[in-house]
Amino acid sequence: MIASTHLAVGAASALFIQRYVSTKDEYDVVKKYLFGFGAAIFSHMVLDSIYHLEYSLQGQALTSCLVVEFILVSMVLLFGQKNPVIQKMIVLGIIGGALPDGLYFVSLFTGWNWLLMVHDLLHVTHGMLSWLYANYFVQVLVTLLAVFYVRIKFRTA
Ligand SMILES: [Zn+2]
C-alpha cells in the first residue's frame, strides 16, 4: 500500500476514534493522544489486510518517493490547522500510520532485528482479505477521502 494512504488514513483514524474516547475533563488529552496513536497503527493493519498493489520502485527511488509523500501529505493535512490538540492528533496519526512500515526501514539502518519482529507481527493480517483488491486508483481514492475527512470535519476558521 502506498505511504500516502497509510499517512492520511492514520490521521483520519486518530481523529475519528476520539468520539469514542471518554475523558474526565477536557484537559485529559494524554488518553486521547494514546487512543489516536493506537487507532492509526490499527488502521495500517486494516488497510494492509486488503490485497493490494505495492510500489514497483526500489532503493533510492523508493526512498525519494516516500520522503516526498510524507512531506506532501503532512502539509496537506496540517496546513492552516490552528487547533493545537487536533494538530498533535494529526501528527500522531501520521506517525502511527507510518510506524508499522517505518520499523522495517529503521531496522535496516540500525540492524535491530527485534524491530523486524515487531514489523512482522504488525503485518500478520497482510493481504488476508484476498477477495478485495486495492490497485493504485483505489489507494489514491481512499487517500483523498481521508484527506477530505480531516480537512472538512476538523477545519478551523
Ligand atoms: Zn505495512
Image (spheres, rainbow, N blue to C red):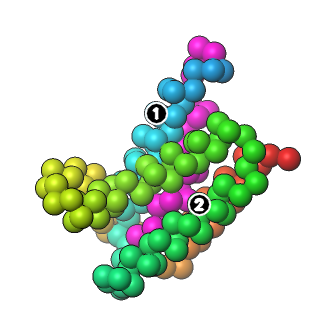
Marks 1/2: CA distance? 20 Å
For label 2, the SS is: helix
Residue 39 magenta: no
Residue at image coords 47%, 61%: 6
Q: Residue 15 appears at what percent x and percent y?
A: 60, 43
Q: Residue 114 appears at what percent x and percent y?
A: 15, 50
CB of mark 1 within 8 Å of CB of mark 2? no
- The residue under label 2 is 74
| Quarter of the view holding residue 82 | top right
Question: Three-letter amino acid code at disc 2?
Answer: Ser
Magenta extent: 1-25
Q: Is residue 88 visible?
A: yes
Residue at image coords 80%, 46%: 156
Q: Main secondary structure of the magenta part?
A: helix
Q: Nearer the viewer, residue 31 or 42?
A: 31
Q: Residue furthest front?
A: 110
- Crowding at label 2, few (<14), some or many (≥20) Cα neighbours within 10 Å? some
- The residue under label 1 is 34
Q: Nearer the viewer, residue 123 or 133?
A: 123
Would you say 62 lies left or right of 156 here? left
Residue 15 magenta: yes
In the displayed structure, 61 sits above or below 66; it is below
Would you say 11 lies left or right of 26 here? left
